Image: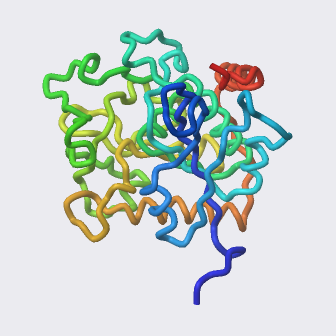
Amino acid sequence: MPLPAAARLKIGLSACFSHADPDRSLFTNKTLQYVEQSICHWLMSAGAMVVMVPCPTGDTARGDTTLAHYADWLDGVVMHGGADVWPGSYGEEPLKDAWIGDRIRDLYDLALVEAFAQAGKPVFGVCRGLQLINVAFGGTLYQDIEAQHGHPETLRHRDPVAYDQNFHAIEIVPGTRLAKLYPEVGTARVNSIHHQGIKGLAPGFEVEAWSLPDRIPEAIRRRPDQGASYIAATQWHPEFHKYGSTDTINDTPILHDFLWACATARVQPQRPHRGMPGRIRDRASRLLRQALLRR
């Protein structure tokens, strides 16, 4: 018998942004907030109900609903993939115009991570979500891996033609939570759809998997001694794994681990742990108050 709605986990999903465009024929000059279908269906495959968490600021904003209200109501949040992270979010200038990223989305995402962290609710990041979480807690990124990493065998982590059919190997770090989810799996194959990646790991986090052979962090998790709630992320897209396929690592253990954390937090509310560094938090709050969705 299907679970009733009240018994199902309610999982927030961060919004992607399509900024106002006067040349767009549909919703001309309107800001769109949306989600990608696969990640919704991935979460729903385990019975969760998925809710996009819209950005509450912008030139059409009304009412008093905040991200904190969503963090209080939902059981956890997934930080979506998408646009590059703006280098200014980690104290750098863009090295190329093509790598300028999405400053507006960064401000929203930083505030969303902060809201769920302060509420003690689980946070899971995918691709950009991993990068954003790393930046939120004080880490830095390569603006472009091929241009900056310098490893003699640096992989092409993003192929715009192959897209989600671009793959490489990863090494799972022994003794980590990820290693416990995949016992006796030392190396695996994942999709790779990114050109930015972690350069400096955020304090309080550990790397759970590395790309091979160039050793870019592919999975991270906040250490338990840094706070009670669950914060983890993968650089690859587990939601793009083809159900039943053995070509890439099975997504199910990762999904069930996150949802288990959400279910545990529901029945055993945890004390909120320390949030992101105050410098980033305060800047995000200030700029969001100024409604920087206006362009």
Q: Nearer the viewer, residue 170 or 45?
A: 45
Considering only vertical position in the picture, is 28 above or below 173?
above
The quadrant the N terminus occupies is bottom right
Taking the view exactly as shown, the residue that stands out farthest to the front is 25
One can see residue 67 in this view? yes
Q: Quadrant of residue 154?
A: top left
231, 39: nearer the viewer: 39
Query: Does 294 sit left or right of 254 as displayed?
Result: right
> Which residue lies at the image location 39% right of the left edge and 60% below the top edge?
180
| Residue 178 position in % (x across, y down) | 40, 54
The residue furthest right is 64
Considering only vertical position in the picture, is 183 above or below 60? below
Left or right of 107? Residue 39 is left
Identified at 44% across, 45% down, the residue is 126
Q: Is residue 230 visible?
A: no
Identify the image quadrant of residue 215: top left
Q: Position of residue 190 (x, y in %)?
A: 26, 50
Q: Left or right: 253 with respect to 139?
A: left
Q: Residue at x 55, y 22 (%)?
A: 103
Give the residue displayed 45% in from the left and 56% down from the top: 37
Locate residue 125, reporting x and y percent. Answer: 49, 45
